[in-house]
Structures are given as structure tokens and as C-alpha cells.
Image (cartoon, rainbow, N blue to C red):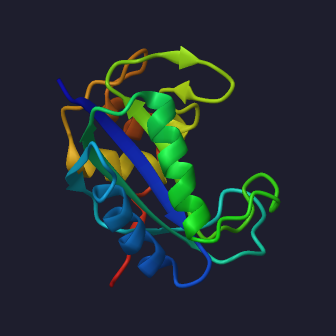
Amino acid sequence: MPNHVFIGLGSNLSNPVQQIVNAIQDISALEQCSLELASSLYETPPMGPQDQPDYINAVVKISTSLKPYQLLDALQGIENQHGRSRDTGRWGARTLDLDILLYDDIVSHDPRLTLPHPGLASRAFVLYPLFEIDRQLKLPNLATLQQLIEELDEAPPRIAHQ
């Protein structure tokens, strides 16, 4: 039986819209993975240092028979193919960032892969795209998407034009 996984995508370097579009194609081409849904592309300000370009963010839902660490390794391979540098510091500019947000109902506090993603509940650029593609999504150990969005008390991010 396939596992259902939600992946957050973000980019703010080297033509971010194209980076995200290409990354979605790369994810859908992974062996043992099938793209189910993809959100719109959202334009959002950077979380950390403000002296960097705005981000383009999206969320995809896939079904996969890959185990969580196999999928994590595959996603990090895609990031590397897109020129991802890991020495930009926390919240620094990047060509591509792929985060496993949810992997079925798995709850994990492993240092390499925390599930659900630890920032999921506090990030508009994750909550709104998730809500767009699955309004009924049940989040393990968290409130509903609607409740999290209401608690966030932020305007929806702007949908980017392609």
C-alpha cells in the first residue's frame, strides 16, 4: 500500500519559479513515487535575513513506496542537482529546499527527520498551500489546517504568476 507524503518546496535563487517547476517534475519522476497534487506557487518574504530575494513556495502530495529515509535521500539528491548549497546558514538564500512535511501519520523526533515537519504549524507558506490541495488533511498531533491558519492570523501569501 502506498504511503501519502506532503513535500514543501522553496526557492529564491536562480529563477525560483523555474526551480520549483523543475523540482516538481523531478519529484514526479522518482522511482516508486507518483505525483498526486501540486499547489499553486506562492511568493513569500524570506523567514530569516531580509537581505535576500523573496521565495517561491509550493506543496506537493505524492504517493510512494519509498521509506522515509529513502525519500529524504532522494529529495536531497534533487536539491543537489539544483545546485543547493548547505553553507548559506539557517534560512539563507537557496536554489532549492525540499522538506518532507508529513509522511502518512508518522510522528518522529529523529534528529535527521522530524515528522511532522517542526515548522509546519507556524508557516503560512506551508499551511496555505497544504490547505489548497487538501482541506480535510488530518495532521498527527496538531490541530486542523483551518485552526492552524486561524491561529497564525496572517494574510494568505500571494500566488505567483508563471
Residue 86 image offset from top left, x and y in percent = 75, 57
Q: Nearer the viewer, residue 152 or 129?
A: 129
Q: Nearer the viewer, residue 27 or 50?
A: 27
Residue 93 image offset from top left, x and y in percent = 70, 68
The image quadrant of residue 54 is: bottom right
Res. 154 visible in picture: no
Q: Furthest residue to the front?
A: 31
Q: Is residue 126 above or below residue 159?
A: above
- The residue at the point 31 percent across, 52 percent down is 60
- The residue at the point 75 percent across, 62 percent down is 92
Residue 41 image offset from top left, x and y in percent = 36, 68
- The residue at the point 26 percent across, 33 percent down is 4
Q: Nearer the viewer, residue 28 or 89?
A: 28
- The residue at the point 31 percent across, 25 percent down is 104
Q: Is residue 80 above or below residue 68?
A: below
Task: Judge left or right: residue 23 versus residue 47.
Answer: left
Task: Judge left or right: residue 116 versus residue 81.
Answer: left
- Name the quarter where the N terminus is drawn: top left
Q: Is residue 149 above or below residue 86?
A: above
Residue 97 image offset from top left, x and y in percent = 57, 57
